[in-house]
Image: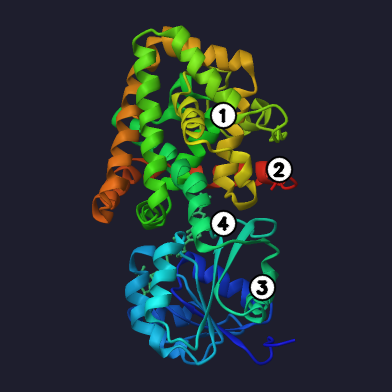
Amino acid sequence: MGRTKEDASIGIIGMGDMGKMYAQRLSDAGWRINACDRPENYESLQQEFASQQGVTIFPNGHLVSRISDFILYSVEAGVIDRVVAQYGPSTKVGAVVGGQTSCKAPELAAFEKHLPQDVEIVSCHSLHGPKVNPKGQPLVLIQHRASDESLQFVDRILSCFGSKHVYLTGEMHDRITADTQAVTHAAFLSMGTAWQANEQFPWEISRWVGGIENVKINITLRIYSNKWHVYAGLAILNPPAKQQIRQYAESVTELYKLMIGGHREELKRRVKAAGASVFKEGTAGQDLLLKDEVLDKFSLSKRSREKAPPNSHLSLLAIVDCWSKLGIVPYDHMICSTPLFRLWLGVTEYLFRNPDLLDEALDTAIDDNNFRSDDLEFTFAARAWSDCVSFGDFESYRDRFERIASYFAPRFAEASTLGNEMMKTILEKTSNNP
Ligand SMILES: NC(=O)C1=CN([C@@H]2O[C@H](COP(=O)(O)OP(=O)(O)OC[C@H]3O[C@@H](n4cnc5c(N)ncnc54)[C@H](OP(=O)(O)O)[C@@H]3O)[C@@H](O)[C@H]2O)C=CC1
Ligand SMILES: O=C(O)C(=O)Cc1ccc(O)cc1
């Protein structure tokens, strides 16, 4: 049977949103937890967890590492090397170590560099945010330097989440999450940047209200209300993500040039060819239920909507062009997808599997001047985010992110209630389609 709840304990280093969620759920399931955050947070964390049975808070990672049998690092990706260098040598002999960072190459390199040889490595990644119910969501497990018995030990610990365990190498994990997460975030970050640049709150403008616009708005605000380092880390530290985001920016630029040049036939030919290569006959065609009747319920706008407003949908046309250029079949990644990716694929599919809507978007892109300045700003934004990720500068990423986040901040509370509701409704309805 190996290590059990009775004789083994779990260490968590980094008690931020994800660390706390893990501590809460694992202790509820009967595991003993030893946890810490940075030393200056010791007292406040102790108070916060005073009434949580089974969780002991320690002042630092040395004290957690020396007594725990499975130790999970749940810190910012940008500091993983420094934190493992600090506490790794204190790891209990024979323990198993893992991490929760969203990009595995730097995390596994830090483990190999700083952990003693008598320590095993099984890493993990919950592919959802801390407020999403883990049940049914993908949870990646990476048996990097460990026996089968130790993998089973980690499997047993994490089984209380009810997530779908997906077994990958670190490299496969990073390749897939570059395709799914990084470029998805780039698209929504760019929408927010464009709205801010044009001084818009899109739900206050009639041409944005309703249907799939609600998904764009709610997800964009959800991302900007979150922590910048989560998005910076998984884009900047993951090399294939840079290439993906660059291709997305190129697709946006090239399609925008066709639009303003009035090249209707070329635009239609290119977009439809890309659509045919991504949404092949026989591919999932899941009923993602992204129907206007459902989505209209999740509007921040107080206005009523009479008819679906036309939109050029540059962000959606470009993602399909980008997938097609890189030979990516998004359905291949469903097993390892996040809720945001599934929604993003859902809205894209909604547009591309509806030929009338797609034609309307392409005609709007050519004929309707109302979208020119929105799409111009979106193009600038996609390129700027791509440059920012390519330069790999965390501080300038933070600066851009926080500047735009502060513009939307007054609306976060309202948007998060509505966005959570929307995610829940849509994800519940699609839970059989992982
Ligand atoms: N949020 C999400 O949606 C998801 C995040 N992840 C990944 O999980 C990891 C944690 O993310 P999340 O919980 O959201 O981020 P948080 O910023 O909420 O948590 C990270 C915590 O680690 C602490 N920390 C930093 N240095 C040390 C140290 N030396 N010793 C102990 N604690 C330290 C931070 O303290 P301080 O803030 O004081 O620096 C902070 O409390 C990240 O790598 C992220 O990419 C994975 C899946 C989903
Ligand atoms: O669903 C998304 O893409 C999110 O934004 C939440 C998220 C962020 C980081 C992760 O490593 C996993 C999930």
Residue 212 is labelled as 1
Residues at badges 1 and 2 in contact (C-beta under 8 Å)?
Answer: no
Q: Mark 2 points at which residue?
A: 430
Q: Is mark 1 within 8 Å of ligand 2?
A: no
- Name the element at disc 4: loop
Q: Which amino acid does label 4 sit on?
A: Leu
Identity of the amino acid at label 3? Asp
Residue carrying label 4? 127
Relative to 133, residue 281 above or below: above
The nearer-to-camera label among 1 and 2 is: 2
How many neighbours does mark 1 have within 10 angstroms: few (below 14), some (14-19), or many (20 or more)? many
Q: Name the residue under label 3.
A: 155
Disc 1 to disc 4, C-alpha distance = 23 Å
Badge 2: few (under 14), some or many (20 or more) residues near its Cα, within 10 Å? some
Q: Looking at the picture, which amino acid does disc 1 mark?
A: Ile
The x and y percentages for residue 201 are 39, 31
> Ligand 2 near label 4 (Cβ, under 8 Å)?
yes
Look at the numbered discs 1 and 3 and tell me whether their residues touch, using CB distance below 8 Å: no
Q: Mark 1 or mark 4: which comes first in sequence?
A: 4
From the viewer's perspective, tell me whether residue 194 is left or right of residue 21.
Answer: left
Pick whichever of labels 2 and 3 is earlier in the sequence. Answer: 3
- Residue 174: image location, x then y, percent: 48, 55
Question: Taking the image as drawn, is residue 423 in sight?
Answer: yes
x, y percentage for residue 277?
58, 27
Q: Nearer the viewer, mark 2 or mark 3?
A: 3
Sequence-wise, the earlier of marks 1 and 2 is 1
**Gap between marks 1 and 2 measured at Cα:** 16 Å
Say if residue 59 shows up in the picture.
Answer: no
Badge 4 crowding class, 10 Å Cα cut-off, few under 14, some 14 to 19, many 20 or more, is many
In terms of secondary structure, where does tag 1 sit? Answer: helix
Give the mark toward the camera: 1 or 3.
3
